């Protein structure tokens, strides 16, 4: 009987090892370990053994059952592993094939620059103001200390919509200053972005329509040093903490004192190069203390309040930022251009 | 304004290098645009004296000369020139020299004879015979300047100058002069200003009997000053004057004309010289032109004058357009015997308008138009006469005609140092402020500031603040952050919604465009807008750049079509674009139009109606616009009549979308279907639902049932859907179309439409029987109302 057990062991282990799949192993389990299997059949013959032999053989048979069950489970795991590996091998793909296209549109480069600037000002407590593009000459000129007869009001420079020169396409975002001061009492902190129009023929650096951003601060005790601080902060946030700024006296009818603000050329750091046309500095914006006449014209008491204003040309800023060489590209809206940003 | 540093040094002595000078001037408000070294292109060219000339042994047309160039031994140079003779002083380009234009001259051989340099003509030195009037155009320059062999030619010809070109702001016409810039220089560098007072000997007869001046229109001519010179000898000006004119960008002509230009550059006061013989009746009348009057100006053009223009006339006729250009009838010629020097002050606006109307902006008019110093007329005319005597150009008559229409009192301001400091944020002591102002020519006594006559731009304490700040140095002012009440700041709801709309459009694959707000009036026809459409009532620009930018747009569809068409012509295979575009709608009884924003989406290439509709639906849904419905729109003439829908939400019309009418795409030169949506942005905002509130997640499972019904092909899906929704007694949670089929076995004129229905109760698990009962109700309704039968 011992020999017969050994016989079952050998043939079972041999069959397990040879089995090619889990289904085959299941039938081998039935054949060797099932209720009607070979091992059970052998145990049924235990009655023919002596009482001394019976427990010994019983032990041997149980040990064999355990061993065979263990071997069978181990073999199942191996085969499952092999099957998984084979499946994964079958599923290999070429990961260098491009992904399923998801097209996301592009922001216009000017919007990128504008939104960045607006976010900076909002962070500094500014509100965003808006005003009409078709504007009254009184807002665009007269109330900005640019009286009738001033050269800026010529028909050759400004688009007019009425014969009496009373309605025009605004030439600057500055009229928003007057509209805001008219409606709102200080403290005022606004920026006003928008389209402006001048009678310039289209070329690489001119367009009859372009974008500006106006800024205005009016409060008690606003000084020229505040103007410097605010604009320096803007420049450093836009162009990095290490950027250098300089202020140059200039002239605008509606600010006094007035200045232009230059940033040191990013390319040559002041030595002079192609980007800054050899000057070492790049003109960024115009600014100044709001002319007392403009404040007074809006009913603001100039003995109590003062303010500063600034205007930034967004196209120039955008072109410089992205090294765009021709202004016309900005309004052509060629997909090949737009998709670069 | 071009400034010669040599000329400047006559008035103020500074030690700054060119770069230091340019920077200091720029930072004090006189911005340096360009700088130029006059002789920068000339290297190693010296004066040579011709010692001898002999014939070239191998060439008939060449001569060999020995030239003393100040070196130990003379140079041998071969030349083809015919106008040189022994003892002539000539410019010699030595071995290794450079001439303007980068031409390099090296020693070499000419037909077998060594030649160690080159003799130069005027042209080879980058000059013209206007610069050197005694020179010949086609020969070597024989120098008449006092000079000696070996001397640098740049020094001899006055090319050793540094020219600084300033951008002068329109409020500072006083700086359009050497003296004005010298005054700025002196203030900026803290060096004394040496002004020269012109002295005229005269004594050559009396002017009064010969000439009288009458100002008829004093509003346009506050002052007219004149002197006269007889026995005029027209000749070239001396080298020093020509050099300074040349450095200032003015072409030398003859002594009299050069003197007027020289004085204009030096004093900033334009002058005019005209032939006394042409002044009929010995009277100069300053008056507005008479209707129909004409004048041929110095440039040879006949000008039709209008009564708004000021003229200088004699008894009968105009002899010049005041402040703009003189008349040909009184031009200085070689035979001119007596000259009148006019130095007048004119109304700036009038001069500008005249110059614009006549289309001739001259050096003089561009100065006058900025408003010049009325006190500047007299010194200028004196200086001109002084120069006449200095140059020996004629004999100056006694006395000056000086007609003033008014007195010109000085502006007086008070120096409120406290207020200036408050505006600037500084603590500059009052005496320091006074010092800055004095250095600019202001007379300051105590807190009384008398503004110099040439500074009409100074009217206010804030103007004084700028003068103080710029001399103190803008960049030395401290930098502070605003104090005071904190403000909240931030974007308005509309501003945030615009950004969201842009983000969503880009998420759908559409790229942002920016297009012009003005369009061509012909665009209405191009998009087939009906003749009766109110959108054709657009605001016209009265002075547009051209017809194609002649009106303010009332619709943004043409801008989108134009952009699509341009991309198509660039052979971009597809485009998906959006724009938040303003339109300008005239309003009855209002001066200003309504500026309304539209959201445009457009595209072509691998696109259909439903792609665009899907994008629009997604944008609207994510902007929280609920209850959006689409209805077929066959009347919109810009769109395909069968592929266009109007969009609305809760009954509020929001816009239109669809395939562009093939006739419109054809108009725009596109041979492919294009699609566009136009949505009214304010309407969209009005339809936004309140912010979402959380709804508990369903606790019971849903049941889904698929149904396919056959109905008339003409019944819209939306009608079927609304019928289904009504039949479901509140249990239907979702209807999803998943198939539309026509063709066999579905009979002709019919279609099979398949929906997936999701049913769910919020208070129990639905049984199959309940769900089936609901579906039966739905099917009954579909059959009863629409004749649709289960397939």
Image: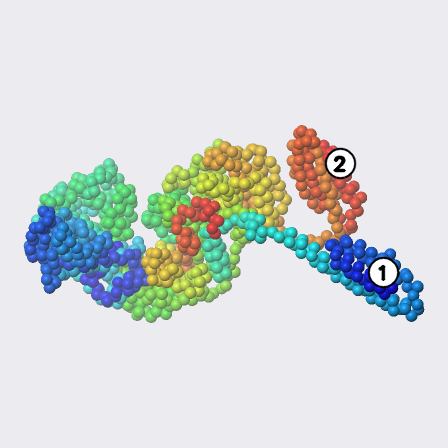
Q: Which mark is residue B780?
A: 2
Q: Which residue is mark 1?
A: A39
Observer-side mark, 2 or 1, equals 1
> Which of B369/A229 is in front?
A229
**Towards the viewer: A214 or A36:** A36
Residue beneath the point at 23% across and 61% down: B182
Residue B55 in percent (x, y) is at: 7, 50
The chain identifier of the residue carrying mark 1 reads A
Image coords of residue A206 (percent x, y): 37, 48
Which of the two residues, A37 or B683, is positioned nearer the viewer here? A37
Residue lying furthest top:
B748
Residue at 91% in and 70% down = A52
Q: Which chain is mark 2 on?
A: B
Between the C-alphas of marks 2 and 1, the distance is 67 Å
Residue visible at 32% across and 69% down? B430
- The quadrant of the rendering that contains the C terminus of chain B is top right
Q: Quadrant of residue B789?
A: top right
Where is residue B263 drawn, in percent x and y?
Answer: 19, 54
Residue B723 figure quarter: top right
Q: Is residue B119 above or below residue A242?
A: above
Horizontal and vertical percent position of residue B23: 30, 63
Q: Residues within 10 Å of mark 2 (few under 14, many from 20)?
A: some
Q: Quadrant of the N terminus of chain B?
A: bottom left
Give SS at disc 1: helix
Asked whether residue A80 is in view, the answer is yes
Which residue is painted at 56% across and 33% down in the image?
B641
Label 2: which secondary element: helix
């Amino acid at each position: 009987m011992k020999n017969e057990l050994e016989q079952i062991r050998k043939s079972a282990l041999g069959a397990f090892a040879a089995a090619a799949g889990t289904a085959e192993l299941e039938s081998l389990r039935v054949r060797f370990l099932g209720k009607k299997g070979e091992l059970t059949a052998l145990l049924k013959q235990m009655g023919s053994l002596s009482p001394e032999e019976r427990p010994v053989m019983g032990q041997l048979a149980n040990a064999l059952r355990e061993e065979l069950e263990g071997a069978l489970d181990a073999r199942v795991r191996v085969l499952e592993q092999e099957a998984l590996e084979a499946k994964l091998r079958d599923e290999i793909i070429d990961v260098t094939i491009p992904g399923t296209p998801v097209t996301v549109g592009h922001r216009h480069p000017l919007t990128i620059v504008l939104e960045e600037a607006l976010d900076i000002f909002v962070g500094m407590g500014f509100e965003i103001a808006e005003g009409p593009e078709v504007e009254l000459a009184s807002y665009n000129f007269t109330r900005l200390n640019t009286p009738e007869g001033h050269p800026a009001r010529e028909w050759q420079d400004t688009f007019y919509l009425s014969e009496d020169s009373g309605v025009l396409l605004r030439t600057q975002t500055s009229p928003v200053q007057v509209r805001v001061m008219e409606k709102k009492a200080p403290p005022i902190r606004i920026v006003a972005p928008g389209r402006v129009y001048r009678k310039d023929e289209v070329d690489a650096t001119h367009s009859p329509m372009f974008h500006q951003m106006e800024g205005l601060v009016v409060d008690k005790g606003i000084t020229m040093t505040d103007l410097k601080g605010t604009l320096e902060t803007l420049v450093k946030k836009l162009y990095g903490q290490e950027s250098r700024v300089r202020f140059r006296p200039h002239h605008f009818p509606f600010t006094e004192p007035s200045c232009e603000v230059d940033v040191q050329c990013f390319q040559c750091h002041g030595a002079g190069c192609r980007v800054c046309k050899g000057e070492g500095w790049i003109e960024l914006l115009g600014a100044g203390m709001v002319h007392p006449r403009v404040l007074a014209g809006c009913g603001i008491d100039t003995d109590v309040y003062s303010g500063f204003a600034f205007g930034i040309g967004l196209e120039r800023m955008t072109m410089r930022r992205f090294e765009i060489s021709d202004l016309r590209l900005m309004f052509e809206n060629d997909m090949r251009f737009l998709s670069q940003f | 304004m071009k400034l010669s540093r040599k000329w400047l040094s006559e008035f103020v002595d500074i030690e700054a290098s060119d770069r230091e000078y340019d920077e200091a001037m720029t930072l004090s408000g006189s911005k340096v645009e360009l700088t130029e070294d006059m002789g920068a292109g000339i290297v190693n060219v010296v004066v040579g004296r011709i010692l001898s000339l002999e014939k070239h042994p191998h060439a008939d047309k060449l001569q060999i000369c020995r030239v003393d160039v100040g070196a130990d031994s003379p140079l041998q140079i071969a030349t083809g020139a015919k106008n040189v003779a022994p003892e002539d002083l000539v410019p010699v380009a030595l071995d290794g020299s450079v001439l303007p234009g980068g031409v390099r001259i090296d020693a070499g051989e000419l037909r077998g004879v060594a030649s160690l340099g080159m003799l130069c003509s005027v042209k080879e030195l980058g000059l013209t015979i206007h610069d050197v009037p005694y020179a010949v155009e086609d020969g070597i320059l024989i120098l008449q300047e006092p000079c000696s062999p070996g001397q640098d030619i740049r020094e001899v010809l006055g090319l050793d100058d540094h020219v600084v070109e300033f951008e002068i702001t329109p409020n500072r016409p006083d700086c359009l002069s050497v003296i004005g810039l010298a005054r700025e220089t002196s203030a900026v560098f803290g060096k004394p200003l040496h002004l020269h007072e012109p002295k005229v000997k005269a004594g050559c007869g009396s002017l009064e009997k010969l000439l009288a001046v009458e100002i008829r229109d004093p509003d346009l001519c506050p002052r007219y000053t004149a002197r006269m010179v007889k026995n005029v000898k027209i000749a070239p000006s001396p080298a020093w004057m020509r050099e300074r004119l040349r450095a200032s960008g003015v072409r030398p002509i003859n002594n009299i004309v050069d003197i007027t230009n020289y004085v204009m550059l030096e004093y900033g006061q334009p002058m005019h010289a005209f032939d006394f013989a042409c002044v009929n009746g010995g009277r100069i009348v300053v008056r507005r032109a008479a209707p129909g009057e004409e004048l041929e100006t110095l440039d040879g053009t006949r000008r039709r004058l209008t009564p708004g223009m000021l003229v200088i006339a004699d008894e009968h006729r105009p002899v010049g357009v005041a402040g703009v250009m003189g008349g040909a009838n009184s031009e200085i010629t070689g035979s001119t015997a007596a000259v009148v020097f006019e130095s007048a002050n004119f109304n700036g606006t009038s001069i500008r308008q005249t110059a614009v109307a006549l289309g001739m902006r001259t050096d003089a008019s561009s100065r006058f138009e900025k408003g010049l110093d009325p006190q500047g007329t007299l010194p200028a005319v004196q200086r001109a006469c002084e120069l006449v005597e200095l140059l020996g150009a004629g004999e100056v008559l006694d006395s000056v005609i000086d007609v003033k229409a008014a007195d010109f009192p000085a502006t007086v301001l008070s120096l409120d140092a406290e207020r200036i400091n408050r505006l600037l944020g500084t603590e500059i002591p009052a005496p320091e402020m006074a010092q800055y102002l004095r250095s600019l020519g202001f007379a300051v006594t105590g807190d009384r500031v008398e503004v110099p006559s040439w500074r009409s731009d100074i009217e206010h304490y804030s103007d004084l603040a700028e003068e103080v700040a710029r001399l103190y140095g803008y960049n030395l002012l401290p930098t502070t952050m605003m104090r005071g009440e904190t403000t909240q700041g931030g974007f308005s709801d509309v501003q945030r919604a615009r950004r969201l709309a842009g983000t969503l459009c880009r998420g759908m694959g559409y790229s942002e465009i920016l297009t012009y707000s003005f369009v061509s009036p012909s665009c209405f026809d191009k998009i087939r807008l009906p003749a009766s459409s109110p959108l054709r009532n657009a605001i016209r620009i009265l002075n547009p750049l051209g017809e194609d930018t002649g009106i303010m747009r009332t619709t943004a569809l043409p801008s989108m079509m134009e952009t699509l068409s341009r991309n198509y012509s660039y052979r971009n295979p597809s485009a998906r674009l959006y724009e938040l575009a303003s339109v300008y709608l005239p309003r009855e009884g209002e001066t200003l139009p309504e500026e309304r924003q539209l959201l445009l989406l457009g595209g072509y290439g691998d696109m259909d109606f439903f792609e665009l509709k899907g994008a629009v639906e997604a944008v609207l849904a994510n902007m929280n616009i609920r209850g959006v419905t689409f209805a077929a729109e066959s009347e919109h003439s810009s769109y395909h009549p069968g592929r266009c829908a109007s969009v609305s939400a809760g009954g509020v019309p929001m816009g239109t979308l669809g395939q562009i009418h093939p006739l419109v795409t054809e108009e725009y030169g596109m041979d492919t279907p294009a699609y566009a949506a136009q949505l009214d942005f304010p309407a969209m905002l009005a339809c936004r639902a309140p912010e979402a509130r959380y709804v508990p997640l369903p606790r019971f499972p849903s049941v889904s049932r698929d149904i396919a019904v056959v109905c008339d092909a003409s019944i819209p899906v939306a009608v079927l859907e609304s019928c289904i929704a009504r039949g479901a007694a509140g249990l239907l949670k979702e209807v999803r179309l998943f198939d539309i089929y026509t063709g066999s076995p579905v009979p002709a004129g019919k279609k099979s439409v398949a929906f997936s229905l999701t049913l769910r109760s919020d208070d129990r698990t639905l049984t199959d029987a309940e769900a089936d009962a609901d579906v039966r109700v739905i099917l009954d309704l579909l059959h009863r109302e629409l004749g649709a039968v289960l397939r």
